[in-house]
Image (tube, rainbow, N blue to C red):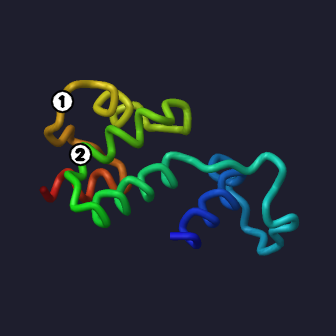
Amino acid sequence: MIGAIAGDIIGSVYEFAPCKSRDFAPLFHPDAHFTDDTVLTVAVADSLLHDRDPVAAFKDWGRRYPDCGWGGMFARWLFSARTEPYGSFGNGAAKVIICSA
């Protein structure tokens, strides 16, 4: 959990500006921040640790952080009343759990 979140924060400044260098100095760049990946990681943990419906956890956690970088299709689903799979082409945790439920 800590590694996933740290990696998300460290890599956030490179998400739309790919970097092939192995020099990540400073490791936590001043512009680094958590992203939608961290929010869904926490939602998955909440779902597993508390035997909670993944859809409810995603919507609960996701709605707390509306501006953290959601993709368009996921954001539309997240802020809707829908609970069924939405046909994502993404590679995030929500697709894995929601589409396999």
Q: Quadrant of residue 46?
A: bottom left
Secondary structure of the residue carrying numbered label 2:
helix
Query: Foreground: 52 or 35?
Result: 52
Residue that mark 2 sits on: 55
| Residue 21 image point, x, y percent | 78, 70
Query: Which amino acid type is marked by label 2?
Result: Val
Residue at 50 percent of width and 46 percent of height: 36
Of residues 51 and 11, the one drawn nearer to the viewer in this rendering? 51
> Picture coordinates of residue 62 (x, y %)?
41, 39
> Badge 1: how crowded within 10 Å, few (<14), some, or many (20+)?
few
What amino acid type should be assigned to the residue bearing mark 1? Arg
Q: Residue at x 58, y 73 (%)?
A: 3
Residue 44 location (% of width, % of height): 35, 59
CB of mark 2 within 8 Å of CB of mark 1?
no
**Which of pointers 2 and 1 lies earlier in the amino acid sequence?**
2
Residue neighbourhood size for the residue with mark 2, other residues' Cα within 10 Å, grouped as few (<14), some (14–19), many (≥20): many
Q: Secondary structure at mark 1?
A: loop
User: Where is the C terminus found, in terms of image quarters?
Assistant: bottom left
Q: Would you say 46 lies left or right of 18 here?
A: left
Closer-to-camera residue (5/52): 52
Depth check, front residue: 91 or 3: 3
Residue displayed at 57% across by 70% down: 2
Q: Which residue is mark 1?
A: 82
Q: Position of residue 1 (x, y in %)?
A: 50, 70
Identify the residue at horizontal 68%, vertical 48% (top origin): 33
